Image (cartoon, rainbow, N blue to C red):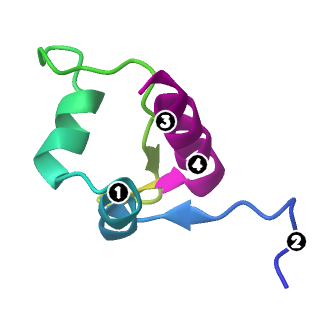
Amino acid sequence: MNNPSTIRILRLPAVIQKTGMARATIYDWLNPKSPRYDSTFPKKRMLGVKSVGWVEAEIDEWLTRRSKLI
């Protein structure tokens, strides 16, 4: 049973699976210099020197907002 206050961090493969998008697309959305930049996409969090993750609840909220626009 999951505690609703538990923060779950997703690594890139899980974000790819959850969004259905490619790695390159996700990083384009995060890059302000990219023409595909999406300021609404959740920011990655540094987990260590060379590892990043995303808060699952933020990804879920973004997907919900995006689905309402379509």
For the residues labelled 1 and 4, the Cα–Cα distance comes to 26 Å
Q: From the viewer's perspective, is 6 left or right of 67?
A: right
Image coords of residue 30 (percent x, y):
29, 30
Q: Which-is-in-front pick, marks 1 and 3?
A: 3
Residue placed at 64% from the left, 64% from the top? 8
For the residues labelled 1 and 3, the Cα–Cα distance comes to 34 Å
Image coords of residue 27 (percent x, y):
21, 39
For label 4, the SS is helix
For the residues labelled 2 and 4, the Cα–Cα distance comes to 16 Å
For the residues labelled 1 and 2, the Cα–Cα distance comes to 28 Å
Residue extending farthest bottom: 1
Estimate how packed mark 1 is, as few (under 14), some (14 to 19) or many (20 or more) residues with alpha carbons within 10 Å: few
Which residue is the site of mark 2? 3
Q: From the viewer's perspective, is 55 left or right of 21?
A: right
Which numbered disc flags the more N-terminal residue, 2 or 4? Answer: 2
Q: Amino acid at mark 2?
A: Asn
Residue placed at 23% from the left, 16% from the top? 32
Q: Which-is-in-front pick, marks 3 and 2?
A: 3
Which residue is the site of mark 1? 49
